[in-house]
Amino acid sequence: MTEIMTLEPLPIDAHLARIGSEVARARAAVVVAAPGAGKTTRVPASLLEGGRVIVLQPRRVAARAIARRIAEERGWQVGAEVGWQVRFDRRFGRETRLLVVTEGILTARLQSDPLLSDFTTIVIDEFHERSVHADVALALARQAWFARADLRIVIMSATLDAAAVARFLGGCPIIDVPGRAHPVTVEYLPGERLADAAAGAARRTAGDVLCFLPGAPEIHRALPQVRAAVGDAFEVLPLHGSLNADEQDRVFEAPQRRRVVLATNIAETSITVPRITAVVDTGLHKVARYDAARALDSLDLERVGQDSADQRSGRAGRVAPGLALRLWDARDRLRARREPEIARVDLSAAVLDIMAWGGHPLSMDWFERPANGSLESAVELLERLHAAACGRLTEIGRQLQRFPLHPRLGRILVAGGAAWEAAVVCAVMSERSFVPERAATTTCDLLAAVDGFDTLPPHVRQVTNQIHRLAVRTLGAAARAHIGESDLRRAILSGYPDRVAWRRAPGEARLRLATGTGATLAAQSGVIEGEFLVALDVQAGARDRARESPVEARVRLASRVEREWLEPTGVRVEHRVEETTGTVRAVEVERYHALVLAERPARIDPDQAAALLAKAYVSGGPGDQDAQLLRRLRFAGETAEFEELARGAARKARRLADISLRAALRPDVACALDTLAPERLLLPSGRTAALDYRADGTVATSVKLQELFGLQDTPRVGARREPVLLLLLAPNGRPVQTTRDLRSFWEKTYPEVRKELRGRYPKHPWPEDPLNAAPTHRAAARQRRGHH
């Protein structure tokens, strides 16, 4: 083990010998150490006796700070014995024995050398943050670990389900290291302003104050308020990933006065800000999420988990007893642990890395396997970018893999020929640092960044130049110095082919995305003309729990797309029922995913037309006439269903109004129906009455009482001779009696009915002996004449 110089003692020191021996024996170990234990700087250096060590850190600012700290502790030089390699920045040489890397650097090295031959030990630090890069790196490193008998893996974390990681590495040992024992007083101040809480913490403690905020915009809004609250005795500094290296490194310099540092969760575990004795925690962070169904990214403001809250508070107790002020109610319940990125973000960059390594995401042995749907969506996006085909990378995919950018942005660089304008767009989008104010009418909101390049933040200009140089080297002879506005917009479309949107009406802000969902163009976008556009920066709407549907997304940055640039993704003939006429119309539709590009009249397919008419007819359910026919069929012993008859009837119809279920009956069934289930009943008066076939199987009819004179027994219908339920009507058309036994009615009930009604209706016949009276409907006829 490398000898440690005379240093400030840390809790990890007593465990280094055991860690070294366990790693030598098992070739793997999981180290769980509380913040402040010293694991990040002491463990990697202690493992150098076994050979060169590479350390994966999830954040760029942390990687540089760690390398400097190790160099300071060991008396080494940065760039010599210890170095770093992060996106667009490297300081290491041939003699470097300990290399701290970040983001996709370790993955890129495993792609070019799957056995990682230059290193003996891989250390993955802060694994509890569960970044996608760490998950991919662990999966690939484990394959190298299986193939190389001398390769060693160490996983380090502040809070972690260590048993699960140990199982993934063959049941390797777990070393649990406690942190410092300085007590931290935790107080809750719901509703307190951050600036006031920071000033109060500064008064109550002797060291510096660390404030946790959810993001860079919130930090910049809070800076003047905090400066005013704490006064000139304190230096107030920001700390977040969007700052350039020099700005980030200021928090590690020896201060001239006490400090208040406003940080994102970058300072939660990855970076140890010195001299902190008080923490002010808003309890919020920003969480990246991806909705594959809508192809939309979102950055949601959410409550931190309990593990994060505890780690933040612990930062106050590293050097002395500390104070942690939490700006929420003590009764609030927090989630126990953070959600891993691999379960909630777009995985296209991770899938690109795995394919470049030579694997396939669906067959990869993951530590925690993502949902198949997420992996399949990522593969589909790469195919749309022409980066993958048949499960393998294309030439474009291999070019994208060389860029430390999201595949969408890499595709813009390739399509734009590595032009400077394309590099500006990619830098602005990758750094998430540009949202224009309400612009004049433009074809692309990002043109303001290109035209106003000198006004962009310094780190964005620096990233632009780095991207441009790398893209020129990658594309070689195919590189172009500059491209015009139209070519830039076409290049942007190539990176966001699934984000095309159609304007619902000229000049309107309401959009329909290619995924089929709705969106609204924000007021700050200047792309107010054109039928089609690309939605670049989209704020996904939150889901409405009451309606269980997503609120429309908001498009802040857009770029106009010309109609001729869109190649149809599908052409097919569609049949539709016209609402006004009920007829079927056929059109040939060109679509770009869910968006209609063009429609042309087409020849009607009789089978499809019939199926569509039948579906429309069935959707309304059987009307009274159809219901009667179906009941008559069942009464006659037939088993025909409504949908089946509707399909048959639709084949003989040209429009909805022409559909007749009876026309769909077989001739023998139609003939037998009139015998077995007649539609009407012949009355003694010579007229007929409609029979009502009811759902319960009974048959009924309504008839004027006088029309049944002379009829002794109840009429019967069908093969079963079912008695008809008679609704006997008075001259006014209202029922006076319901019976299935007509003879009993004449004998027992009719005399009372006659007595009651003859005085009210004297012009109607009321014979004492109805069985021998002549039936008549003349009274009914006289009544009808009286209405005219």
Image: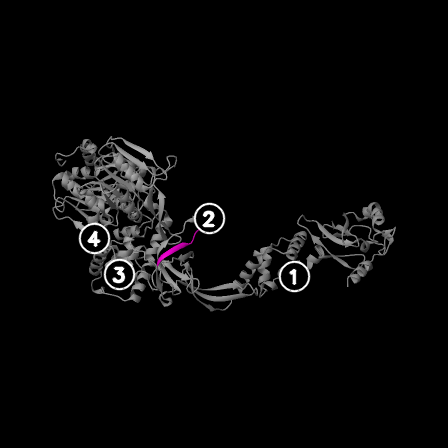
Q: Residues within 10 Å of mark 3 (few under 14, many from 20)?
A: few
Q: Which residue is mark 1?
A: 667
Residue 714 coordinates in the image, percent (x, y): 78, 50
Mark 4 / mark 2, whichever is N-terminal = 4
The kind of residue on which mark 4 rests is: Phe
Horizontal side of residue 45 vs 702, given as left or right: left
Mark 4 / mark 1, whichever is N-terminal = 4
Q: Which residue is mark 4?
A: 88
Residue 665 coordinates in the image, percent (x, y): 63, 59
Give the Cα distance between marks 4 and 1. Answer: 83 Å
Give the Cα distance between marks 2 and 3. Answer: 43 Å
- Is 92 one of the magenta-colored residues? no
Mark 3 / mark 1, whichever is N-terminal = 3
Give the Cα distance between marks 3 and 1. Answer: 81 Å
Q: Secondary structure at mark 1?
A: helix
Mark 1 / mark 2, whichever is N-terminal = 2
Horizontal side of residue 302 vs 175, given as left or right: right
Q: Is residue 268 visible?
A: no
Q: Identify the magenta region.
A: 545-557
Residue 74 coordinates in the image, percent (x, y): 13, 39
